[in-house]
Amino acid sequence: MAGFNGFGGANMQNLIKQAQKMQEQMQQDREELENTTFYANAGGGMVEVEMNGKRELTSIKIKPEVIDPDDAEMLEDLITAAINDANRQIDEKIAEITPSLPGGMF
């Protein structure tokens, strides 16, 4: 019995090469995602957030006219909406670059 010949040695080598290539592509995609900046806003631009692909909030801008000490809840809702929108964009990007991978592999 010579190596993988009975199991299709060339096919096994091709499979290993494909797996390595897929792993390299996943690493490149992960790095690209982490270096991508996502922008989102709420309230017609009253609150703007910037987030990177690691889901780190890197910037938040709040227009002064939306700051009402008597209605902090509205500002909280706008901030939450903007952050959620940025996270949705990240999820869409992940789905775009990993359409054929089972969940959790990225």
Image (cartoon, rainbow, N blue to C red):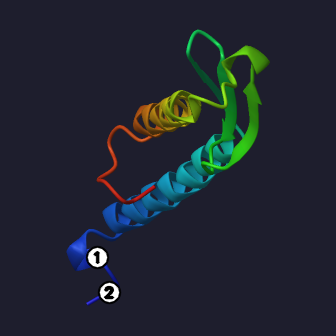
Q: Position of residue 43 (x, y in %)?
A: 56, 15
Q: Nearer the viewer, residue 80 or 72?
A: 72
Q: Quadrant of residue 91?
A: top left
Amino acid type shown at disc 1: Asn
Q: Secondary structure at mark 1?
A: helix
Q: Position of residue 62 (x, y in %)?
A: 73, 25
Q: Is residue 25 left or right of residue 56?
A: left
> Which residue, given by chain and number where applicable, does mark 2 sit on?
2
For the N terminus, the quadrant is: bottom left
Q: Nearer the viewer, residue 81 or 105?
A: 81
Q: Is residue 71 left or right of residue 88?
A: right
- The residue at the point 56 percent across, 28 percent down is 71
Amino acid type shown at disc 2: Ala
Relative to residue 8, is residue 1 depicted above or below? below
Relative to residue 77, is residue 54 depicted above or below? below
Separation of residues labelled 1 and 2 (CA atoms)? 6 Å
